[in-house]
Image: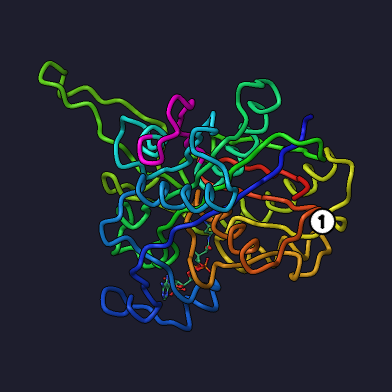
Amino acid sequence: MNGVRIVGTGSYKPKNVVKNDDFKKIIETSDEWIRTRTGITERHMSSGEATFFMGAEAAKDAIAEAGIAPSEIGLIIFSTVTPDYLTPSMACMVQREIGADGAMALDVNCGCTGFAYSFDMARRYLATDDDIKYALIIGAENLSKILDFEDRATCILFGDGAGAAIVSRADTMYAGFYGADGKGGSVLCAENFRPNNPFMDKDAVFDYGIHGGRKEGLLYQDGKEVYKFAVKIMPFVIEKACAKAGIAPTDLDLIIPHQANTRIIQTAAETLGLPMEKFHIVLDRFGNTSSASIPLAFDDAVKCGRVKRGDKVCFAGFGAGLTYGASVFEY
Ligand code: UT7
């Protein structure tokens, strides 16, 4: 029983929709530039909805779709780079909201690959612990709170939202290929508080080894470097996960790629020799929602009937860390 079955999916999108033209009020840009360079038309942005709240709403949607009771959930994994609190974890806050009493609850921070990593982790827990019947995995982000709205090459890319899935063990095909390259961390980073205790040597200088241009707490991205990484890694992880599963990328019915830039997805499709129709894209409506991007897109594919039971599906992600990975499974 080494496979997994996604028995329910859900999502939450903040009510506030920000269109490309809205950015003209704050930066020099155009709808045409954003659409042609990225594929994005609009994105949702929080008007105060917290990360845990969006995650809990997506979770409730997934639980209802799965037709299970929250008490049957034994594990909650919450992926985010924009938690509301450093502690408690977002997973614990969701547990409180949905009443999954006693479930294990933890957060993961793997950038935009986080939901796919969580899926792989959930599969491993389910495979080795019979006490866990259902795992709830969530990807939720409030990226708008860490965006630098003076950086026009970055702030137009991202959006807020959440996606979730309920996962159970199954006797089906599954393979995951995951990795990271911490040496690349400087190209996509956001710094947390620095130590500032009353006893510290204020003259001491400590090199954190992350050399992105920084504004405290705000997201920095070297778009060109991330782009170069992305176009190489996306086809690579899909090929690797398929090889582990003993299938060819052409055998996949549907790929849910991290939704960062349509041009990245097009290049991956060309490299793999696959038609774009194999990739489900919601980037135009939601922008890049980091951890939430894959579960939002997958929930969309489920709800619009794009994916059918028995289909071979691939989640393929890359992001801050740098992290990367893919899961191939039977829906
Ligand atoms: O989940 C995280 C993963 N992140 C990504 O995958 C992001 C990967 N990177 C990208 O998607 C692209 O690099 C961007 C969309 C961020 C930028 O696209 P680009 O084609 O690499 O543009 P560029 O940075 O080379 O900029 C081209 C021009 C520049 O003007 P000059 O120097 O040629 O005069 C920019 O200043 O476009 C300008 N520009 C803009 N113009 C209008 C940059 N941002 C904007 C903007 N509106 N918003």
Task: Report the front residue among 29 and 274.
Answer: 274
* 316 left or right, relative to 156: right
Q: Taking 2 as reference, is 300 above or below it?
A: below
Q: Pick the residue in front: 89 or 240.
A: 89
- Name which residue lies at 66% across and 63% down: 265
According to the picture, the residue beneath numbered tag 1 turns out to be 252
Label 1 C-beta lies within 8 Å of the nearest ligand 1 atom: no
- Is 211 located above or below residue 234 in the figure? above
Q: Residue 286 location in percent, x, y?
A: 48, 66
The boundaries of the magenta stretch are 96-110
Image location (x, y in percent) of residue 303: 61, 64
State the residue at coordinates (53%, 47%): 63
Question: Which residue: 29% across, 63% down?
Answer: 149
Q: Position of residue 11 (x, y in %)?
A: 49, 57
Which quadrant of the rendered structure holds the N terminus? top right
Left or right of 139 on screen, residue 219? left
SS for callout 1:
loop
Residue 100 included in the magenta stretch of the image: yes
Q: Describe the colour scheme in one phrase.
A: rainbow
Q: Amino acid at mark 1?
A: Leu
* 33 with respect to 132 (left or right): left
Horizontally, residue 139 falls left or right of residue 166, namely left
Q: Is 3 one of the magenta-colored residues? A: no
Give whichever of 133, 297 is nearer the camera. 133
Q: How many marks?
A: 1
| Residue at the extreme left | 198
- Crowding around mark 1 (Cα neighbors within 10 Å: few <14, some 14 to 19, many 20+) is many
